[in-house]
């Protein structure tokens, strides 16, 4: 193994990129982007909020795909992907649920509204928290993987139904892009892209770290078992 | 022909067990009744006008039904853990999708048994006037119960495999069941206001749609929950 | 991890075995319960499965019964095979595991009728009657089994496992909890099923029981087959030692 590949293996390059991305996000959101006319500085939270929401949705999608993958293939690799994605999705959803109300308080005059995206994010957060809980309660790793996969699949399938239901029930989320959206100033667009890149990069770094942790967890379980066998305890 | 005999055999055995122990239905009924009574205090119902009461009653009714269903299905599915009877069913030459169908049906039957008692009690406690709404009410109750039972059967089997009860089941089912609860409450409110079922659109369709989708997902995933 | 060597691994290559596992592995997460098992049991053969606690005996039986899905490999019962045991093939199997699968709030008769019907038998009532007598529970037939002793439960579980007249019997510690009379009936019933052409795969801690019936012994260690030989190649005591493995 040569020098450069071992340096790569430490994850240091990703860490450096992560730090640079974080700095770029703060700079772009706080200084580069102009202050929004009606909402003022609070609007700057958007550069964190929206990328976090996008990455959360991505993580939950990955969790469901990994769930299907595990149930079909029963391979630990899919399980580790699922374990990682569910936890990261919950993390991003938490960030969305914290930043959203801060913005909403100033924009809509209320911390919380029962509009579809907010409500669906909350429900997603609860469902995937359930998946984490099931994993913790489960007795053996196989059962944990199987049952958590089922929850992740149901969760991902259920979310569009939840979204549509809440949309029919209530609705008023600002649409920034697409039809009905006000559009963005060019500097805002750039700042948003920087934010999206930085957050996605963070997602990749965290995913890699958590996945390796999952590998270590699995190795410990296998090693403990082997040690027991050698001691004649099994 | 064989499938029919298998389904009847499971239904008869579970009905006998339920008749002898009341282990699912009794806690369901008592729990739902307690929710009704506590709601009377919590929402100070006697102090409200009939019109204000009518706005609260659908929510109270659906909280009672949803939680009682969780209690009943958790008890019912947990019972199959005793002596590992769930494995006894898996050993037999029964299609696992059919097995989900039977447990789903049993959940619906428990729900109907609950509602047959609960709705008349609610009429008495909350001074409701169902008038001509009872047929529509029966329809929306059935559709929402089918949807809740599908989620309850699949996730209840997860919870039963973990040896846990209704607390974990509530955490898993209720967020996912949000569309069903919205549909149930909205439709019930429309019906109690004396309007026809059709004016509750799209909610009756949502109830029916979720019942179909959750049952299909449940049938697909059930084997994965049960099989090691 | 080195396996003891020098033991002959025999592979039966019967054209149509009653039960065949090909390259079967089962992992529970990072833990391997069965590793690359090749086992073929001929129709009418009686095999005793020995090994330590956690050697994979019970997993192997549950897998053959269709309760556990292999991570890799094929399971074949008669002609039907695949990644897991097909639904129709499960009708040919009678499985008796650690748990009885019985309903404690039903009577002994109701339990047997339920399982006869689950296996699609039309004559459930007559079968229940006959099996109650065979396991000596006719006097307790109408009692809810909640109050049964461990021995009575095991007798009823034996009847439950055999009521549909299976061709392949998978018995996991069938004598556990049985009184001497129950054990006598067990040996008699299993012997009759075997004499009628039934195939047996029996797990037992107690080689004496299995060796009354089995002609072939397979020893599992850490999820692998380490010995596969004729039952009369060793004494009962030697088999007990072979099963014990590290206990020298």
Image (spheres, rainbow, N blue to C red):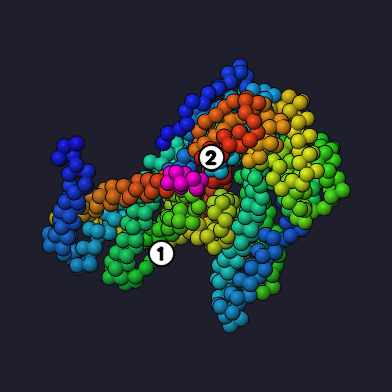
Viewer-nearest of discs 2 and 1: 2
Q: Residue furthest top?
A: C15
Q: Which residue occupies the foreground of this view, C192 or C80?
A: C192
Q: Which residue occupies the foreground of this view, B100 or C31?
A: C31
Kindly identify which chain the residue marked by label 2 belongs to: C
Residue under the point 74% across and 60% down: B21
Mark yes or no: residue C228 visible.
yes
Can you say whether C62 is above or below B66 in the image? Answer: above
Q: Residue furthest bottom?
A: B47
Label 2 and label 1: CA atoms lie apart by: 70 Å
Instruction: Assess whether residue A233 is covered by the magenta stretch.
Output: yes
Say which mark, if any, is on residue A166: none
Q: Position of residue B119 (x, y in %)?
A: 67, 65
Q: Which residues are magenta?
A: A226-234
Q: Which residue occupies the foreground of this view, A225 or B124?
A: A225
Q: Residue furthest right?
A: C139
Q: Which residue occupies the foreground of this view, A112 or A55?
A: A55
Q: Are marks 2 and 1 on the same chain?
A: no
Residue under the point 43% across and 58% down: A129
Mark yes or no: residue C78 visible.
no
Q: How many marks?
A: 2
Say which mark, if any, is on residue A114: 1
Instruction: Assess whether residue B142 is covered by the magenta stretch.
Output: no
Disc 2, SS: loop
Can you say whether C239 is above or below B214 in the image? Answer: above
Say which mark, if any, is on residue C248: 2
Q: Residues within 10 Å of mark 2 (few under 14, many from 20)?
A: few
Placement of the N terminus of chain C among the 4 image quadrants: top left
């Amino acid at each position: 193994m040569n020098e450069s590949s071992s340096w790569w293996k430490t994850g240091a390059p990703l860490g450096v990129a992560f730090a640079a991305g974080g700095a770029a996000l703060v700079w772009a959101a706080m200084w580069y982007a102009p202050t929004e006319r009606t909402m003022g500085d609070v609007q700057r939270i958007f550069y964190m909020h929206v990328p976090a929401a996008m990455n959360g949705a991505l993580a939950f999608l990955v969790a469901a795909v990994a769930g299907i993958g595990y149930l079909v293939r029963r391979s630990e690799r899919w399980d580790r992907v699922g374990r990682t994605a569910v936890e990261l999705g919950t993390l991003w959803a938490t960030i969305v649920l914290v930043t959203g109300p801060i913005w909403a308080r100033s924009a809509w005059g209320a911390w919380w509204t029962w509009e579809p995206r907010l409500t669906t994010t909350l429900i997603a957060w609860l469902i995937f928290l359930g998946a984490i809980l099931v994993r913790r309660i489960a007795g053996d790793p196989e059962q944990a993987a199987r049952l958590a996969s089922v929850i992740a699949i149901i969760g991902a399938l259920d979310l569009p139904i939840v979204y549509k239901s809440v949309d029919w029930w209530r609705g008023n989320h600002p649409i920034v892009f697409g039809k009905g959206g006000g559009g963005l100033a060019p500097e805002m667009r750039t700042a948003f892209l920087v934010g999206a890149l930085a957050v996605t990069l963070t997602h990749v770094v965290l995913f890699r770290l958590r996945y390796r942790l999952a590998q270590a967890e699995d190795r410990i379980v296998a090693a403990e078992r082997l040690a027991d066998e050698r001691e004649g305890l099994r | 022909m064989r499938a029919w005999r298998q389904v009847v055999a499971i239904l008869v055995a579970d009905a006998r067990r339920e008749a002898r122990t009341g282990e699912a239905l009794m806690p369901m009924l008592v729990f739902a009744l307690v929710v009704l009574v506590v709601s009377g205090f919590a929402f100070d119902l006697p102090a409200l006008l009939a019109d204000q009461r009518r706005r609260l009653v659908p929510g109270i009714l659906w909280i009672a039904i949803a939680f009682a269903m969780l209690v009943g299905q958790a008890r019912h599915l947990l019972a199959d853990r005793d002596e590992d009877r769930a494995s006894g069913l898996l050993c037999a030459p029964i299609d696992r999708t059919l097995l989900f169908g039977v447990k789903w049906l049993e959940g619906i039957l428990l729900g109907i048994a609950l509602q047959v008692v609960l709705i008349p009690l609610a009429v008495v406690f909350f001074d409701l006037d169902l008038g001509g709404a009872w047929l529509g009410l029966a329809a929306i109750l059935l559709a929402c119960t089918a949807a809740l039972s599908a989620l309850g059967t699949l996730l209840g089997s997860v919870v039963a495999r973990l040896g846990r009860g209704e607390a974990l089941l509530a955490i898993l089912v209720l967020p996912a069941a949000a569309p069903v609860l919205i549909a149930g409450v909205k439709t019930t409110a429309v019906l109690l206001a004396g309007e026809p079922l059709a004016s509750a659109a799209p909610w009756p369709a949502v109830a029916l749609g979720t019942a179909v989708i959750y049952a299909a997902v449940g049938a697909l995933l059930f084997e994965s929950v049960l099989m090691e | 991890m080195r396996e003891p060597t020098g033991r002959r691994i025999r592979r039966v290559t019967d054209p149509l075995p009653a039960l065949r596992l090909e390259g079967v592995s089962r992992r529970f997460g990072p833990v391997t319960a069965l590793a690359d098992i090749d086992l073929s049991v001929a129709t009418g053969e009686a095999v005793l499965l020995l090994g330590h606690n956690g050697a994979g005996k019970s997993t192997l039986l549950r897998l053959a019964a269709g309760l556990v899905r292999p991570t890799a490999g094929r399971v074949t019962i008669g002609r039907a095979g695949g990644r897991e045991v097909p639904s129709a093939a499960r009708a040919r199997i009678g499985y008796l595991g650690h748990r009885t699968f019985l309903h404690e709030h039903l009577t002994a008769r109701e339990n047997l009728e339920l399982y006869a019907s689950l296996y699609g038998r039309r004559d459930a009532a007559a079968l229940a009657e006959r099996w109650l007598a065979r396991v000596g529970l006719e006097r307790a037939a109408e009692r809810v089994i909640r109050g049964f002793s461990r021995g009575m439960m095991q007798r009823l579980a034996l009847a439950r496992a055999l009521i549909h007249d299976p061709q392949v019997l998978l018995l996991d510690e069938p004598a556990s909890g049985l009184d001497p009379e129950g054990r006598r009936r067990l040996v008699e019933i299993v012997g009759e099923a075997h004499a009628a052409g039934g195939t047996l795969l029996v797990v037992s801690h107690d080689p004496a029981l299995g060796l009354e019936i089995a002609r072939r012994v397979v020893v599992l260690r850490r999820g692998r087959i380490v010995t596969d030989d004729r039952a009369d190649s060793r004494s009962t005591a030697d088999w007990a030692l072979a099963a014990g493995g590290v206990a020298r």
